[in-house]
Amino acid sequence: MDLYDFETEFNKSYNIEKLKVESIKELEILLYSDNPSNEVIELRKNLEIEETRSTLKIEFAFVMRYRDLGSTGIKVSEISFGTIPILSGDCPVLPDYYSPDEDTAMGIMEYAFKLGCNLFDTAIVPEYGDAEIKLGKFAAFVGREKIIISDKARFFYGDDMYKAVHESYKNLGTHADIYFVHQVDEGNEDVTFGKYGAVEAMKELKAEGKIKFAGIASHYYDILLRGAKDKRVDVLQGSGNILERGMLDRMENEPLFIQKGIIINKVYAAGILPSFFPIKTLISGVLSYPVSSALIGLGTLEQIDPAMSYDPEYNNEPKSDKTQGYIRPTFSQVMQLLEKSFKPIPCDRCQRCRCIYGTEIHIIFRQYNYYFLGKDYWALRKLDLGINQSAANCKKCLEMSCMKKCPHGINIPETVQMIKRLVEIHIRNSII
């Protein structure tokens, strides 16, 4: 039985209700009990589980849950594997302990696979270094039909995207199941969605059998909404977490997203939120939205256990097919916890605050919060690139339309000036 069919087959064939268990933990106790019932003995046999716990982590793939990937007809694991951390090479955004060799990377992916992960996300070489090549070798090793590969490239014209998909085929040694146009924004969206753009090229590639599904990957709600309206697009990849949830909130309330597969990255907010919140809270918070999968970059075996075999937080409300009854902390609760460490700007990055001068207010506020959350060097460098001009534009603006659209009532002009002063103070003591 393939892993991605496990949950359906488990419930249908093994009648979990007859075992009278309500959680994976209770099931584990029954499976390894000293005096098993006939039902448990039969289940052990069907699942080929030994009577010892020596291979527990390998056999316990059924901890993973699966969801529909929109209208594609396939199911994906709730947790998907992001391959950025397994690339090798000079990549300044990665910690020193990453950049594993091929054998180590294969072992990391195999471990996640054995815990139930069936969706692996990568990008074309050299965007993600050699991760695409490593994933291709892993697919051949584990069995190509047993995993779903999503790939991406930052090309917006049709001819370039067509070439990229063929290049990815060479690197992977197989066709990707899903292929995304990566980093679509306002500057390239018209080309991407246009007559000779990347989306049209992927429509042709689908017809030729070179890919199965076409996707749009973006950090911008309006771009994803345009993708949701486009019949040529099957899957969307956006970003969000329990802090930066604004886009997720808007997607949850927009019916157009229901038919699309939705993969969410930045669940840990570039790796900083696990220092403030339990992993299960971060994952449960994202999975409480009607999304298909939470995409998490994993670079060590130690990171896989809490991500793949966590004990999710449930509520007692009726569970839908999409959200599985996961608990979502309120935005106020998140703010209250962060306020114990610093004074965060209560911005959830909903992206409603459109500036007439083009300032991306939500990004400035994100960089401010990230500065205090642990990404101080990165955030300060980013802020220094344009905060003076943004503050000047903000000071001369008379419309203040951004404030009228902010759901949290942030005094945006005053906050931008405060950030400018912070950068001026800290820049003197930093080498940018």
Image (cartoon, grey):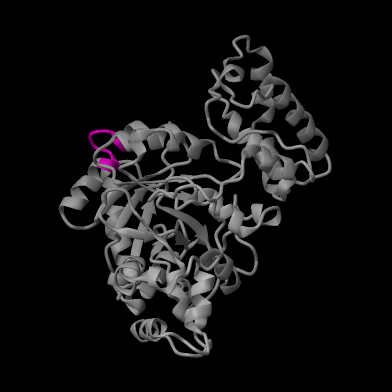
Find residue 244 and report its horizontal and vertical position in percent.
Answer: 58, 41
Asked if residue 194 is among those painted magenta in the image, a careful observer would answer yes
At x 62% / y 55%, what residue is drawn? 271
Nearest the eye: 257 or 196: 257
Q: Looking at this rendering, what residue extends furthest in the left direction?
A: 208
Asked if residue 120 is among those painted magenta in the image, a careful observer would answer no
Find residue 165 and report its horizontal and vertical position in percent.
Answer: 29, 55
Nearest the eye: 16 or 221: 16
Which image quarter is the C terminus in? Answer: top right
Q: Let me know if residue 103 appears in the view.
A: no
Nearest the eye: 431 or 340: 340
Picture layout, residue 103 above or below residue 70: below
Picture layout, residue 210 above or below residue 247: below
Instruction: Determine the image quadrant of residue 49.
Output: bottom left
Instruction: Determine the image quadrant of residue 142.
Output: bottom left
Nearest the eye: 411 or 258: 258
Instruction: Determine the image quadrant of residue 397.
Output: top right
The magenta span reads 192-199
Q: Let me know if residue 56 appears in the view.
A: yes
364 displayed left or right of 224: right
Find residue 371 and report its horizontal and vertical position in percent.
Answer: 72, 44
Find residue 262 and report its horizontal and vertical position in percent.
Answer: 39, 47
143 displayed left or right of 40: left
Which image quarter is the N terminus in? Answer: bottom left
At x 27% / y 58%, what residue is drawn? 166
169 displayed left or right of 65: left
